[in-house]
Image (cartoon, rainbow, N blue to C red):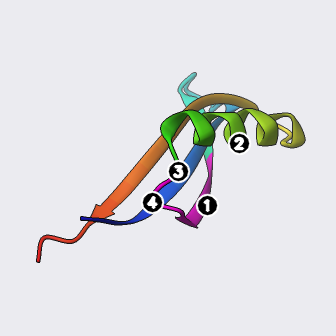
Amino acid sequence: MLVNSRLILVFSNGVDEFGDPIHKTKSFNNIKPTATDEQLTAVASSLAPLQQWSLIQVDRTNLHSLM
């Protein structure tokens, strides 16, 4: 049974001195487990312009109860 979800936004923050990309994340905990992926994508799209970095990835992490 799905008991909890987390929305994770991954942003690009340039490159380091070696040319490797630097990523910053923003996490939102206690997302309703019944929220659809489409709803969370819409939320992420609404939040992205409010950030100072460019959005490159949106992830969802789910916690399931096995017993």
Q: Position of residue 57 (x, y in %)?
A: 56, 31
Q: Where is residue 13 in the image (x, y as percent from the top left)?
A: 71, 35
Q: Which amino acid does label 2 sit on?
A: Val
Q: In this rendering, would 50 be left or right of 25?
A: right
Q: In this rendering, would 14 be left or right of 29?
A: right
Q: What residue type is labelled 1?
A: Phe
Q: Position of residue 1 (x, y in %)?
A: 24, 64
Tell me the magenta residue range.
Answer: 25-34
User: Which of labels 1 and 2 is toward the front?
Assistant: 2
Q: How far apart are marks 2 and 4 (CA)?
A: 15 Å
Badge 3 marks a residue whose secondary structure is loop
**Dot 4, crowdedness within 10 Å: few (<14), some or many (≥20)?**
some
Frontmost residue, 1 versus 26: 1
Frontmost residue, 45 versus 12: 45
Q: Are marks 3 and 2 in contact (CB under 8 Å)?
A: no
Q: Earlier in the sequence, mark 3 or mark 1?
A: 1
Q: Do the residues labelled 3 and 4 touch (CB within 8 Å)?
A: yes
Residue under label 1, please give it: 28
* Residue 6: in magenta span: no
Frontmost residue, 61 versus 64: 64
Mark number displayed over residue 43: 2
User: Which of labels 3 and 2 is toward the front?
Assistant: 3
